[in-house]
Image: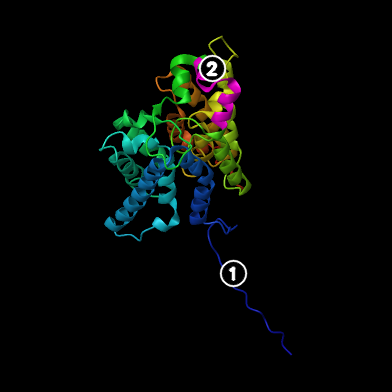
Amino acid sequence: MEATKKEQNFIVSVSPHVKSDETTSRIMWTVSIALLPALLSGLYFFGPKALFVTLLCIISSMIFEHLYFRIVEKKSAVGDGSAFLTGLLLGMNMPSSLWSVSPFTIHVPIVASFVAIVITKQLFGGLGFNVFNPALIGRAFALISWPKAMTIWSAPTAAFFAMDAKTTATPLGILKEEGVTKLIEVFGDKMSLYQQLFTGHRAGSIGETSAIALLIGGLFLLAKRYITWHIPVSFLGSAALMAWVMGGKGGLFTGDPIVHLMSGGMMLGAWFMATDYVTSPSMKTGQIIFGVGCGLLTMLIRLKGGYPEGVMFAILIMNCFAPLIDRGFRSKVFGAVKPATAKEGSK
């Protein structure tokens, strides 16, 4: 009896050969979920006006992405969650007072969403091809175009249904203009200052105020292995070191790194903006260099620049260097042989 031969079909394909169940859509929606604690904190402290600004950014971003695909006659990819995430991050980087500064500032989130989605993302080739973080470019455009509207901050009310709120300065604004002594005086004492920075009971952008909420979201992404420690730790570590060394009025090594770490967009930037897959290096060593660059530039702008905050500009500047960093630290191809030079070939 002849042995039956079992036919085997081999599928030949290009790399990568190791597959994962994770999809772009799942990653985008999971990151959005990780941002929920910070978003809910912002809504709690700033009320319905914060919800209105955030929803306006999200809806505008999704509409602009859908319209762009209609114009270029391609299948809409709004469902992958990237436009939603960009709008969410943009909204969380906006001041809640935008809706009430004047009757005309409602256009600011809409225009910022257009710049983020159409100009920064789609005109560069779509998801995966943009050089800069879309949400940060949208915010930067809004800040440069409407500086007054983008720098009026509502004081936290801790009452969701409170529509009106007085305006106040951010902790970084007070620190920049009047120093840490005045900042501590405003909050009562140093421990009260730390506590309110940690929980989020302070003026600032909608999603940046609560350090604990952002830390929860960041650790969730670490546990899911959507991000690694390299960028957040190097970002926060280098910023803390520079704040301690150069941030004090009494000379070197008299600064307060805790205030700088929990103020402004430091936590939001380190965990959610700088770790963007597309605009940050893919190699681990490169990610550490990228994070250190973000941290040092942030503190350089905060301490020596004209703006009290520097996270946004620092990340955008380092976005420019991400391809160069990756090129310098790319892995050696397995089995590759160094090509012989003309001198070696003549021997």
Q: Where does label 1 land, which residue?
A: 10
Is 121 situated left or right of 156 in this image? Answer: left
Q: Nearer the viewer, mark 1 or mark 2?
A: 2
Magenta segment's dominant SS is helix
Along the line of sight, the residue nearer the viewer: 58 or 271: 58
In this view, the residue farthest toward the top is 250
Label 1 – label 2 distance at C-alpha: 62 Å
Q: Earlier in the sequence, mark 1 or mark 2?
A: 1
Q: Nearer the viewer, residue 134 or 100?
A: 100
At 55% across and 20% down in the image, what residue appears?
A: 188
**x, y percentage for residue 327?**
51, 38
Q: Which residue is mark 2?
A: 247
Frontmost residue, 65 versus 18: 65
Image quadrant holding the C terminus, namely top right
Q: Is residue 285 visible?
A: no
Q: Residues within 10 Å of mark 1 (few under 14, many from 20)?
A: few
How many discs mark residues in the rendered view? 2
Question: As shown in the figure, which amino acid type bears the numbered disc 2?
Answer: Gly
212, above or below 36, in the image: above
Label of residue 73 in the image: none
Front one among 238 and 20: 238
Q: Is residue 9 magenta?
A: no
User: Residue 60, percent across and down?
Assistant: 33, 48
Q: What kind of colouring is applied to the model shown?
A: rainbow
Q: Amino acid at mark 1?
A: Phe
> Dot 2: what SS?
loop
Res. 112 image quadrant: top left
Q: Which residues are magenta?
A: 182-198
Magenta-span inclusion, residue 195: yes
Mark 2 nearby-residue class (10 Å; few <14, some 14–19, many ≥20): many
Residue 28 visible (yes or no): yes
Q: In x, y percent, where is residue 23?
A: 52, 57
